[in-house]
Image (cartoon, helix red, strand yellow):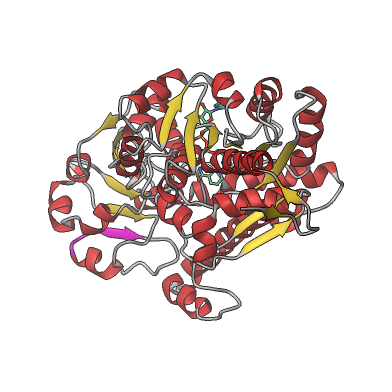
Amino acid sequence: MLFFTKKGKIITKKHLFVTLFLLYSSLSLLASQHISIIGTGYVGLVTGACLAKMHTPKSFHITCLDIDQNKIQKLNAGIIPIFEPGLSELVTRNVQRNMLTFSHNIPIIVSQSDIIFIAVGTPTKQDGSVDVSYFYNALETIAHHANKNPTTVILKSTLPIGTGQKAITYLNEHGKKDITFHVISNPEFLREGTAIFDTMNPDRIIIGSDSEHTRSVMKRLYKPFIKQSIPFLYTSLSSAETIKYAANNFLAIKISYINEIANLCDKTGANIKDVSKGIGYDPRIGASFLKPGPGFGGSCLPKDTLGLLAKAKEHNVSLNTIAAAVKTNQHQKLMPYRKLKKCFTGEPLTNKTITVLGLAFKAGTDDIRYSSAIPIIEKLLQKQVSIKAYDPQAMSEMKKLFPNITYCNSAYEASEESNALLIITDWPEFKMLDMASIKNHMHGNCIVDARNIYDPCTLHSLGFHYMGIGVPSPS
Ligand code: NAD
């Protein structure tokens, strides 16, 4: 049997064999690409586990990498170094499926990787700008060791606007000359506490890149999301970087805004719960992020507000709304402390026993970065207060910062013989406490509910002196 090309030329058996062989090898190459993720923290580990869940061993293999040898040892022993609901099960399942491995040997794995995510931390420097040293460290490793042509580098870390472009220049200057590097800004929007759900059900996928090739890579990587009709927005590198900052800064402004309105409610007698509900019905405003509290914390909003302000300063642009949100937040962080002092009018706090319920910056995580509990505990310690603390997940992290306060096994134990109670994190278990029993075992009756989780009248009827944020205190 003879085969012909479109132009009528005869294809020999040899030609056919070579063509089929090339087709087979390119398909098998496509079929088993290696993804590595540099930085196995909240973002890197969740991204790795979720990508593993989305694919099969025939399509990708994923290796999470970290410079922290102890973290990798733990992961290889089946221990998840962070608390994130559902993560342990997801990781275990995908390790068993041979989809997911962990390594400390970064150069070797990078040299075998077709796609490399960077998910290292980008903390704040003393001057408020972003510390990109971990990022450049990772980039240097890629430049020296990447060996696959092309190599796609996906930036998950939140990086100052303009870093993606710098990364391309860096890789082209320092990487192997026969390798084409494609750099994509693919910002991460997961929330700690719901990180797996957020990653598996994103609102949108932002793909910032100036290269056409990257579209096919990202479509393959995020194929399940295409099926779910999740919006893919293709932008330039700098637009994608700006989207991440603009989103987080908007949320920071919204939180500071509602906190200020709550503080006004405290003076006028209005109830912030009703006010939030009333304005949240307006679709132009939206109902989320309208709960007042002890200010925003965590690994993102505090550093991303400062990071954007630093970038704007570099370009001589004023971001007054964001500067105001930061200032309001600093003030709000000590609002529970100020309310606590009101409970003891005229009396010094010294030698009192105060219970702090909730140490994590929010419920659902063990992350204490920029948690409002930190400045409050510092302030209480300055006043020589005896602190009894409890958090369902974050105590071991907090012990590293404050080894000398008393950590308890439950909210009940922490409240025993206490003069006042501060609720800083809205863990679900705090909403279901037997408050009558707590009150009976306390020495005092003061409660500052910085998350408004309790009904003021109910607690008042139990004998508490109740103070929330922006809700009228029953007298
Ligand atoms: P993290 O601190 O939990 O983890 C970062 C990890 O990177 C650490 O384990 C660290 O040891 C490792 N690391 C640092 N330098 C390294 C290197 N050169 N090679 C290998 N590993 C290295 O950080 P995170 O919370 O996962 O955040 C990572 C990035 O994602 C940050 O830029 C953050 O702003 C962004 N982000 C975080 C969240 C969040 O909720 N945590 C959400 C969206 C975006």
Q: Residue furthest right?
A: 316
Find residue 33 and report its horizontal and vertical position in percent.
Answer: 54, 38
Q: Quadrant of residue 469?
A: bottom left
220 in relation to 475, above or below: above
Q: Is 288 contained in the magenta span? A: no
Find residue 151 and report its horizontal and vertical position in percent.
Answer: 67, 35
Q: Which residues are magenta?
A: 462-467
User: In terms of depth relative to the viewer, which is nearer, 364 or 199?
Assistant: 199
User: Can residue 383 be seen in the rendering of this structure?
Assistant: no
Q: Residue at image x 61%, y 53%?
A: 1
Q: Is residue 445 left or right of residue 339?
A: left
Q: Residue at image x 50%, y 38%?
A: 44
Q: Is residue 438 left or right of residue 30?
A: left
177 in relation to 273, above or below: above
195 in relation to 259, above or below: above
Ligand 1 quadrant in view: top right
Q: Quadrant of residue 15?
A: top right
User: In terms of depth relative to the viewer, which is nearer, 356 or 23?
Assistant: 23
| Image quadrant in which the C terminus is located | bottom left
User: In terms of depth relative to the viewer, which is nearer, 149 or 381?
Assistant: 149
User: In terms of depth relative to the viewer, which is nearer, 22 or 340?
Assistant: 22
Find residue 422 and report its horizontal and vertical position in percent.
Answer: 34, 48
Find residue 300 and report its horizontal and vertical position in percent.
Answer: 56, 45
Q: Residue at image x 82%, y 26%?
A: 173
User: Can residue 346 be seen in the rendering of this structure?
Assistant: yes
